[in-house]
Image: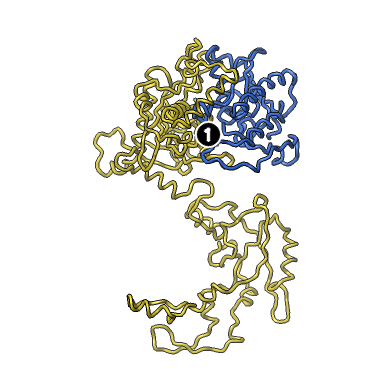
Amino acid sequence: MASPVDSKAPKDFDVAPKSRMVHLKTKEETRQGNETIKVWTVELPSQDSVDLQHLRRFAKPKYLPQHVIGQRDLVKEMYAIPRAWESTPLAVMQAPATTVWEYSTPAKLRSSNRPPTLHLLICPVHVIALADLHSLLLDRVPFCSSADSWAYPLQIKQVTVPLLAPTSPEQADAWSSDYWPTFYRKTNPFGAHPATIAKAEDDLQRPATGNLGVEKAMTLAKKAGIETQCRDYGIGPGCVIMERADNVTEIIAVAGDARQKPLLGGSGIPGGQGGCNGNIMGHAVMRAVGMIGRKRLRVATPLISGRAAKAERNFENCGLDHDEKARDAFFLDLPITPLEEQYFVKDNIKPDGYLCLRLEVFLTHEPCMMCSMALVHSRVGRVIFANRIPQTGGLTAEMIRNDSGPVGLGYGLCWRKELNWQFMCWEYIEPKNKDTGNVDQDNKAEAGGGELKLMLNDNNANVSSFASTHV
Amino acid sequence: MANSVFGPIPNREVHEGFMRKAIEMAELALASDETPVGCVFVHKGEIIGRGINGTNASLNGTRHAEFVALAEIMAKHPQSILKDTDLYVTVEPCIMCASALRQYGIRAVYFGCLNDRFGGCGGVMQIHSDKSVDPPYPVYGGLFREEAIMLLRRFYVQENEKAPEPKPKKNRELKTEILPVNVATPAASKPSTPMPQG
C-alpha cells in the first residue's frame, strides 16, 4: 500500500492543498483481492460440451424454485446450523446507532449473509451416470464421515434447466423462478446486440433533420412498386436502398418489381405460358442491388474501374457473347420509370465502397429466397419489410403462430450463423389511423415514426394477397 | 444429408462430357484471375448458355455464373426452354441461384463439388427439394468433384488483390489431398476449401 506520507506529498501540498477522503477498505475487501484458491480446470472442445454459462454454478436456496429445494429435511438442517458457539467465545459489541452494548456472536452475524447450504449445479445428466456420481461424492467431504465431522446427507436431484442463454431480462426472471437462477448478460447470443438494434431503431424512427426515416422510405418503396405496376411491368413490390454515411442518409437506389417486362428474345411476357413467375431477375431487390453496382462503376476511382473493365474483358477471353442490350433487358438493372431514374442518375454514393456493405433496405414485401440470399451476398446492414409472405419469404424465422397460423417457411436468412453474413431485419407495421385526416396530437405522436418491431417479437402477421408468389 | 446428392448418376459419361465444358469455363476464368466457377446450360444435347462469375465486372455480388449464362439464353430463347434444360456447374449453386433456378423451372442440376459456405443444393440448405410453391428439381453432385475443388484451391493460393486490405498469404500452400465424400464424420465429408464469395 502506498503511504500518504511519502516524498511526493509535501510538493503536492505546496501546489494545491486539497482535502481528500479515502474510504478505508474493510477486512473482507482487502481479503478479496489477495486470497486465492487452487482449483482443477480442464480444457475441452466447446462443440462437444454443453455451455451453461448463463446459469449460476452455486445457487442459494432462497433463489431456487420450490420444486428444486424439495421437502424440509431435519437431518440437513441439524448439520447446517452454525456451530460457531462451540469454538468461538461470545463477544460484546455496541449496536450501531445506539449506546446499548449487547452480546453477539460472529457466527450469528455471518449467518445473515451466508445461507447454511448452497446448491451446486454439477453437470448434464448424460455426462455421468447417477450411480457413479453418487459413489464419487460419497467418498468426499462433506458426504463421508471422518473423525471430526459426520456425513452430510447426499441427495442428488435431477433438475431441468434451460439449455441456451436467455435473450431478455424478463426471460431470465421467468427461467429463474421456473428452473434455476439464470443470468441475463445484456446481450443476445442469437442475434444482433440489443443496443445495436436500439440504435438502428432510433436512427430510423427518429431521423435527424434532413435524414430519411422509415416511414418516408417505406412510402417511397410502395410508390416505386406502383409505378412499375402501372406500366404492366410488375406486380407491385418495391425496394428502396439507402446509404448512411457520416450520419447523413442518401437514397441511392429505387426499384419496382418488373418481372413481367418483355425480354428481347421475342418471347413476350416472360413465363407467360408456363406459370406466372415471369423474369425472376425483375424482382425489386435484384434490380436495386444491380443498380447500385452500376452506380458504383460510374463513380469508381480509376483503380477500381480499371479492375472492373479488366474483369469485363474476361467474358470475351472466355468466349462469351457480349450482347449488352440483351443483358440489360434480362437483368433490368437500369431505371425503367422516372422515379427510378431520378435516384439512379445521382452520383450520391460513396466511391469505392464494397457491394451493398451495411446499406439499409426498405421493402414493401418480404423477399423470396433468391432475393434474401442476394441481400446476404451483398452484405446489407438493415432490412425493413412491410408484408410477410408466408409461402415464399426467406427472412422470417418463425413458421407457425398460435393466433394466425403459418407465418413463414422458417428460413430466417437474415441471421443464420452458418452463413458468412448476418443483418438486422424488422417487419414494418403501418402507422395506425393512416386514413384519418384529422389525427389529434397524441395519436400523431404515437403513430409518428410508424411501428417498427423486431420480427421475432411481433404477433401481428400481415398476410397479403401475394401469399404464394415469390416477392 | 449432403451425401444424398452424391448418388449414382445414370449415363454418367454423357454428363461428364458436359461437366468437362463447365470445367473448361472455370479454367478460363482462373486464367483471367476470376473465381474459377464455370457453368453450361444444356438443352437437348446442345449447350445454349455458358457462364463465369460476373461480380468483379459488375460490382454486383449477385452476378453469379448461372445468371450470366441465363442472360445469354434469354437473349435468344423463350423462358419456357428451361423446363427442358439441365445445368452443369463446377460448384453447387448457392442458395440464391438454387432458388432462382427453381423459380425459372430448371429440369435438373449437375455439379462438381459442394459449397459448404452457402450451397443451396445440399451444402448448407436444400432449396432444390424443400417445400415450396415451385416444383422441385433433381440434383446430381460429384461430377469431377476433385477437379472442381482443385480449381478453387489454386485460385485461393493466389494473392487476392481485390480484398479491401490485402493480407499476406505467404504461408498458403496448395493442398492436394481431397477427402472422399463418404467419410463417416460430417465435418470430414465437406471439402476443406474456402468457397468463393461469387
- Up-down: is A246 above or below A124? above
**Side of A269 where A37 appears, left or right:** right
Q: Quadrant of the N terminus of chain B?
A: top right
The colour chain B appears in is blue
Q: What residue is disc 1 on?
A: A377
Residue A16: quadrant of the picture:
bottom left
Quadrant holding the C terminus of chain B: top right
Residue A210 makes an appearance in the image: yes
Residue A196, horizontal then vertical, whole percent: 44, 47
Q: Is residue A216 left or right of residue A82?
A: left
Q: Secondary structure at mark 1?
A: helix
Which of the chains is yellow? Answer: A
Q: Is residue A459 left or right of residue B80?
A: left
Residue at 37%, 45% (x, y): give it: A202
Tag 1 subunit: A
Nearer to me, A357 or A462: A357
